[in-house]
């Protein structure tokens, strides 16, 4: 994905603010955890409402956008 106007590009945050996913328009993401601003980084791809993540360290993850909320690895993230 390389569209800055895509509705999922931007910052997604857990209710407590501990986990923050920034989906960049370049198809890359940065995940912050607490005080670790760049805890994880990698690429992502969105197809319809499904998102796949490939971290630079080699692990993969996925999630679903449901009614404007990102459900990812047991977490719920809200658009900021």
Image (cartoon, rainbow, N blue to C red):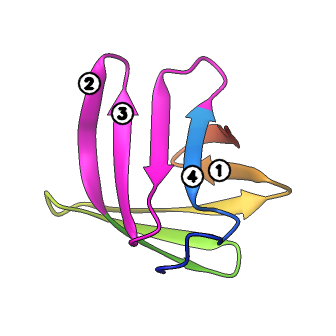
Q: Are marks 3 and 2 in contact (CB under 8 Å)?
A: yes
Q: Are marks 1 and 4 in contact (CB under 8 Å)?
A: no
How far is the residue under mark 1 from the one under mark 2? Answer: 21 Å
Mark found first going from the N terminus, 4 or 3: 4
Mark found first going from the N terminus, 1 or 4: 4
| Crowd rating for badge 1 (residues with CA inside 10 Å; few <14, some 14–19, many 20+) | some
| Crowd rating for badge 3 (residues with CA inside 10 Å; few <14, some 14–19, many 20+) | some
Bounds of the magenta segment = 14-42
Residue 17 lies in magenta, yes or no?
yes
How far is the residue under mark 3 from the one under mark 2? Answer: 6 Å
Between disc 4 and disc 3, the foreground one is 4
Instruction: Tell me the residue that label 2 is attached to.
Output: 36
Q: Is residue 67 left or right of residue 9?
A: right
**Magenta part, dominant SS:** strand
> Residue 71's mark?
1
Judged from this view, the residue extending furthest toward the right is: 67
Mark found first going from the N terminus, 1 or 2: 2
Q: Is residue 57 left or right of residue 44?
A: left
Residue at screen point 36% across, 33% down: 32
Instruction: Tell me the residue that label 3 is attached to.
Output: 32
Judging depth in this view, the residue of 60 and 43 nearest the camera is: 43
Residue at screen point 46% across, 71% down: 52
Q: Position of residue 7 (x, y in %)?
A: 70, 65
Quarter residue 49 falls in: bottom right
| Crowd rating for badge 4 (residues with CA inside 10 Å; few <14, some 14–19, many 20+) | some
| Crowd rating for badge 2 (residues with CA inside 10 Å; few <14, some 14–19, many 20+) | few
How far is the residue under mark 4 from the one under mark 3? Answer: 13 Å
> Residue 10's mark?
4
How far is the residue under mark 1 from the one under mark 3? Answer: 16 Å
């Amino acid at each position: 994905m390389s569209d800055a106007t895509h509705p999922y590009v931007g910052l997604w945050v857990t209710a407590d603010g501990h986990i923050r996913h920034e989906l960049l328009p370049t198809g890359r993401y940065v995940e912050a955890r607490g005080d670790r601003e760049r805890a994880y980084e990698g690429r992502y791809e969105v197809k319809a409402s499904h998102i796949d993540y490939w971290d630079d360290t080699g692990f993969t993850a996925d999630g679903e956008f449901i009614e404007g909320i990102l459900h990812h690895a047991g977490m719920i993230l809200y658009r900021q």
